[in-house]
Amino acid sequence: MLFIFLITIVFIAELIITVAVITTLIKLDKKLKRADTFLEKAAPNIKAVCELIRGISEQIAELTPGWVEKFRETRDKIILKQLESLMAGILFWSINIKVIKRIRKSKFIKTAWKGLSLLQNVI
């Protein structure tokens, strides 16, 4: 009798588990069917969006070489301006060194420098 009672409890537990699994599978099936109908309705719209994206990608692929070329030209212009500025700076610096050497060699500046040094020592 006890054995039959325990078997009955186990059988009822298995029935409860089976019902729970079946109801969960039915809910999952309903969700999958809803998702499938949504995708079927949205498929033309998704296809239109994909075609639009493809068209945009093709246009970008056509325009990219031009943009790259303009970028390179702008880069080259900037580099040339910087080199011109650097060369001008070097030129002015070398001219200033030559002028300073000539000024140091002049007798008037040497005399004025000695006078200023003397005046500085007196003060």
Image (cartoon, grey):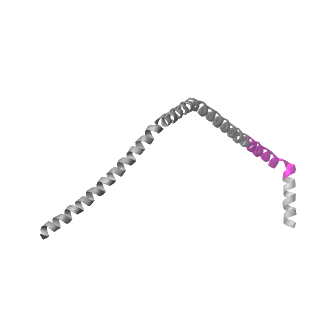
Q: Which residues are magenta?
A: 91-109
Q: Nearer the viewer, residue 102 or 90?
A: 90
Q: Taking 16 as reference, is 90 left or right?
A: right
Given residues 106 and 58, the one toward you in this image is 58
Give left or right: position of 108 versus 37. Answer: right
Instruction: Name above or below for residue 3 compared with residue 37.
Output: below
Give the residue drawn at x 49%, y 37%: 46
Number of marks in the rendered image: 0
Is-magenta flag for residue 96? yes
At 80% from the left edge and 49% from the top edge, which residue is drawn?
104
Please name the residue shown 23% across and 60% down the image. 14
Residue 95: x %, y % from top left: 76, 42
Q: Is residue 75 above or below residue 9?
A: above
**Most foreground residue, 86 or 10:** 10
Q: Which picture quadrant has residue 37?
A: top left
Residue at position x 70%, y 39% from top? 87
**Relative to 24, residue 83 above or below:** above
Q: Quadrant of residue 122?
A: bottom right
